Each structure stands twice: as structure tokens, then as C-alpha cells.
Image (cartoon, rainbow, N blue to C red):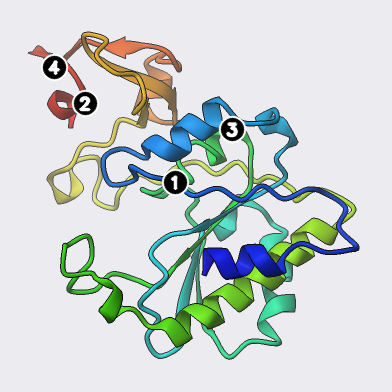
Amino acid sequence: SFAEARNKSSGSGQQRGLIFACWGGEEIGVIGSTYFARHAPCPLGQIAAYVNFDMVGRLRDGKLILQGVGSSPDWLRLIEMVNIRTPLALVLQSDPYLPTDTHEFYPAGIPILSFFTDVHDDYNRPTDDADTLNYAGMEHVAWFGEHLVTELAARPDRLSYASVERAIPKGGAMAGRRIYTGTIPDFAAGDVGGMKISGVQGASPAEKAGLVGGDVIIKFAGHKIGGLEDYA
């Protein structure tokens, strides 16, 4: 899907350039995309939008999930324009705080959109091999991605950025036996003697406590924190 979209998305009429990149290390901490964001070929402020293809090989019943729509009020109009010409059944999800490679881009003020064909029995397992992929479905995903990116590149103006506060899980901070603090881990920090954060979510407990990007958490509720594993 990525290669097809790349081959067909370049052409005349573009108002801005396109950067295509493949990431590695998503499952062990979005390492590839984090490195790119911190060593980008241009300032992140010049990136108008980030479109992410995350697990798009298992299209079923034509259902394509588009995540992060809430990161810009302009996404809906663009999606509607492209969807007129596609057989896909789109499922739109607003939340821009995703456990995927959009992690470094949205907090940097970049509207994001992530393509996803949902989980399945082989998700993140060795059995998720080439013979299980829906290649015809990937062509549909690539077609949609190609036309969406082409529309983005042809826009004379940038997408508007929407700053969204991360919602606390229903039932309070202890819902689902998980505690919400609002910290954003720095997955590329390495061994710093604690859990380094790259930022905090707006209106979160971490922000109210005065934590900021670059802080290193070494103790939490009386427990020593040696790294991300201890904190999680």
C-alpha cells in the first residue's frame, strides 16, 4: 500500500513536497518514527500533516478505520471528497492520541491521520505472514491513500491544527485497573536512571503537578523507577 501510494502521489499541481518514510521498531517503542521526528530533513513546523499506514493488510468487508480525525477540523472535508470515489466503508475515530507512530508528530503541532484495518487473530504474532494478507484490499487502501495525499499536496493552505485534551478513562483514573497520569514517555532516551518523558498531555495530572518534557521520573508513590518498565 505504501509503495503504491508513493508511486502515484507525485505529479504536477502540488503546492508542497512529500516525504515518504518507512519505520522500524514500532512494537518496541516507536523507535523509527521517534528518530525521524528528532532528525527530520526539515523543521517539524514545516510539516503540514502526517499520514500513517498502520497494519493495513487485512481489509475485511471493505472497512477502513481512519484514526486521529480530531487532530484537524479539515480532515472530514478531505475524507468526504476522496470517499465519493471509493468503495471503502470508512470508520472515523477522533482521538489523536494513538499507540502508534503518530506519537511524536501530533504533540509537535502536526495534524495526523492513521490508516488501520483493525486487529485480528494473528495481530502482532509470527503467524501474520504474507499469505494471510488481503492484497486486493491493500490496493483499495493504497488508492484512497494516494488520492488523499494528492489532495493534501495540492492545497494552497495548511490544515488547521486542533489541540485535543486527552480524555480520562470512564470511571475515573482507576478504570480498568490502569492509572492515568498524562505523561508521554521518551522512548529514545536510553538508560537515564529513570523514566524520561518527552512531554505531558494537556490538563492531565502530570501537567498540574508541573512535569514538563525532559523530566526524569525516578520515584512514583514511594516506588523506585529505573525505566519505562518500572513505571508501566
Horizontally, residue 139 falls left or right of residue 32, namely right
Camera-side residue: 121 or 39? 39
- Judging by the rendered image, the residue that carries numbered circle 1 is 23
Amino acid type of disc 2? Leu
Residue found 83% across the figure and 64% down from its top: 11
Residue found 69% across the figure and 28% down from its top: 43
Amino acid type of disc 1? Trp
- Answer with mark 1 or mark 4, whichever residue precedes in sequence: 1
Image coordinates for residue 182, horizontal then vertical, percent: 36, 32
- Judging by the rendered image, the residue that carries numbered circle 3 is 108
Camera-side residue: 12 or 208? 12
Label 1: how many Cα within 10 Å (few below 14, some 14–19, many 20+): few
Q: Nearer the viewer, mark 1 or mark 4?
A: 1
- Answer with mark 2 or mark 1, whichever residue precedes in sequence: 1
- Judging by the rendered image, the residue that carries numbered circle 4 is 221
Q: CA distance from mark 1 to mark 4?
A: 36 Å
